[in-house]
């Protein structure tokens, strides 16, 4: 049993590792979001910046695959 945001489990659902017993009708929309917070100094570090860019790219790819609107 898992309660999770769709973007975090989309790949597992696609592979069949997780199942939605009620299908898309069982999904609940929410206004909640995740925020990536860094300090100015840490974002200046190459490895931190690369990680942040990777997270942003994966997030955009997942939203596109799920048909969700892009963030402003």
Image: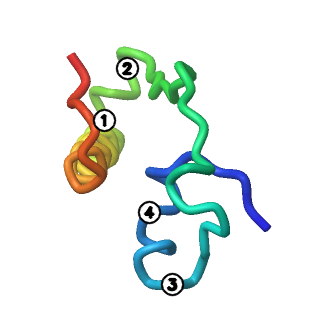
Q: Could you tell me if the residues under marks 1 and 3 are in contact, i.e. CB atoms within 8 Å?
A: no
Question: Within 10 angstroms of label 2, few (less than 14), some, or many (20 or more) residues?
Answer: few
Which residue matches tag 1?
Answer: 45
| Residue 48, quarter of picture | top left
**Which residue occupies the extreme right position in the image?**
1
Q: Give coordinates of residue 44: x percent, y percent.
A: 27, 27
Q: Could you tell me if the residues under marks 4 and 3 are in contact, i.e. CB atoms within 8 Å?
A: no
> Residue at (41%, 76%) from the top-left corner?
14
Classify residue 22 as left or right of residue 35.
right
Numbered circles on residues, count: 4
Of the two numbered discs 1 and 4 on the same chain, state the one appearing first in sequence.
4
Q: Nearer the viewer, residue 49 or 25?
A: 25
Which residue matches tag 2?
Answer: 41
Element at badge 2?
A: helix
- For the question of whether residue 46 can be seen, the reply is no
- Identify whether 49 is placed above or below 34: below
Find the distance from the CA under tag 1 to the CA under tag 4. Answer: 31 Å
**Which residue occupies the extreme bottom position in the image?**
16
Question: Within 10 angstroms of label 4, few (less than 14), some, or many (20 or more) residues?
Answer: some
Of the two numbered discs 1 and 3 on the same chain, state the one appearing first in sequence.
3
Q: Quadrant of the C terminus?
A: top left
Q: Give coordinates of residue 39: x percent, y percent.
A: 44, 17
Q: Could you tell me if the residues under marks 1 and 2 are in contact, i.e. CB atoms within 8 Å?
A: yes
Mark whose residue sits in front, 1 or 3: 3
Find the distance from the CA under tag 2 to the CA under tag 4. Answer: 33 Å
Q: Which mark is residue 16?
A: 3
Q: Could you tell me if the residues under marks 1 and 4 are in contact, i.e. CB atoms within 8 Å?
A: no
Which residue matches tag 4?
Answer: 10
Element at badge 4?
A: helix
Q: Give coordinates of residue 66: x percent, y percent.
A: 30, 52
Q: Could you tell me if the residues under marks 2 and 4 are in contact, i.e. CB atoms within 8 Å?
A: no
């Amino acid at each position: 049993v898992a309660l999770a945001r769709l973007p975090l489990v989309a790949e597992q659902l696609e592979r069949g590792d997780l199942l939605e017993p009620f299908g898309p009708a069982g999904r609940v929309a929410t206004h909640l979001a995740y925020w990536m917070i860094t300090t100015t100094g840490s974002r200046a570090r190459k490895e931190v910046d690369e990680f942040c860019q990777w997270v942003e790219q994966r997030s955009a790819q997942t939203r596109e695959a799920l048909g969700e609107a892009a963030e402003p």
